[in-house]
């Protein structure tokens, strides 16, 4: 490959949550019926080429994990699951992100099937967990500004689950 395509394609819905450290997008290659293997490969080329060191998949299924192996991109798979699973899956997600991001050399992509309510809710919960903000409403406003997306009921449920599970830390 030569030219523009050799550099791959930026994943759809890509947004920096913490500039040059933590990004989010929809699943590389697209979601559900829109998923394309070639697009996934191009997006993985882009991620590797832009120095991403880890991928955190929140999918309930193991989709894409073999592709991360093939691309040589380390990953962790933490299925978000259903409401009853959230306290444990959110804790595992936040601990994993913190461990990776404690190393200044890490550049992480987190994704769900699509860049939607559930992913934005998890990211908002992470702001609380990391101690960036202490209160749910402030975290929601901050994440809405960062992503340019309004957080509706499904995302707010995840934020509430973060708080009720005691996964909120003091400001850093």
Image (cartoon, helix red, strand yellow):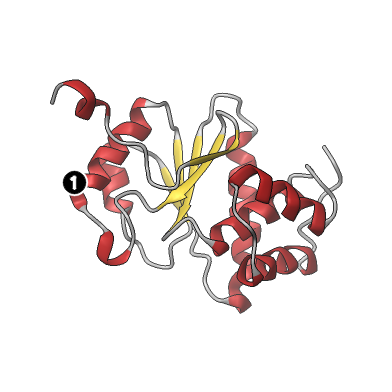
* Residue, disc 1: 38
- Give the side of residue 44 with respect to residue 110, left or right: left
- Residue depicted at x 59% and y 73%: 85
Please tell me whether residue 108 is drawn above or below residue 116 in the rendered image. Answer: above
Q: Quadrant of the C terminus?
A: top right
Give the total of numbered labels.
Answer: 1
Give the image location of residue 100, x and y in percent: 57, 37
Q: Residues within 10 Å of mark 1 (few under 14, many from 20)?
A: few
Residue 132 point in image, percent of width and height: 78, 42
In the rendered view, does 123 fall on the left or right side of 130? left
Q: Measured from the top left, where is residue 31 in percent x and y?
A: 34, 60
Q: Which residue is located at x 33 percent, y 32 percent?
A: 46
Q: Nearer the viewer, residue 132 or 148?
A: 148
Who's the residue at 86% across and 46% down the image?
170
Is 125 left or right of 22, judged from the image as shown? right
Question: x, y (%) of residue 50?
Answer: 40, 26
Of the pair 86 and 146, the residue shown nearer to us: 146
Is 80 rendered above or below residue 109?
Answer: below
Residue at the outermost top position: 3
Residue toward you, 132 or 15? 15
Callout 1: SS: helix
Q: Nearer the viewer, residue 28 or 142?
A: 142
């Amino acid at each position: 490959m030569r030219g523009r395509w050799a550099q791959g394609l930026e994943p759809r819905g890509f947004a920096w949550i913490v500039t040059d450290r933590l990004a989010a997008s929809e699943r590389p290659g697209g979601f559900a019926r829109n998923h394309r293997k070639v697009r996934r490969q191009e997006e993985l080329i882009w991620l590797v080429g832009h120095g991403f060191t880890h991928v955190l998949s929140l999918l309930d299924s193991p989709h894409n994990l073999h592709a991360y192996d093939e691309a040589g991109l380390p990953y962790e798979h933490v299925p978000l699951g259903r409401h009853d699973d959230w306290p444990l899956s959110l804790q595992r997600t936040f601990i994993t992100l913190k461990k990776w991001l404690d190393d200044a050399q890490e550049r992480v992509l987190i994704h769900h099937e699509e860049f939607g309510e559930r992913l934005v809710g998890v990211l908002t919960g992470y702001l609380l967990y990391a101690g960036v903000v202490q209160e749910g409403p402030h975290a929601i406003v901050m994440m809405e500004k960062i992503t340019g997306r309004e957080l509706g009921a499904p995302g707010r449920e995840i934020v509430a689950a973060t708080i009720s599970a005691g996964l909120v830390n003091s400001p850093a």
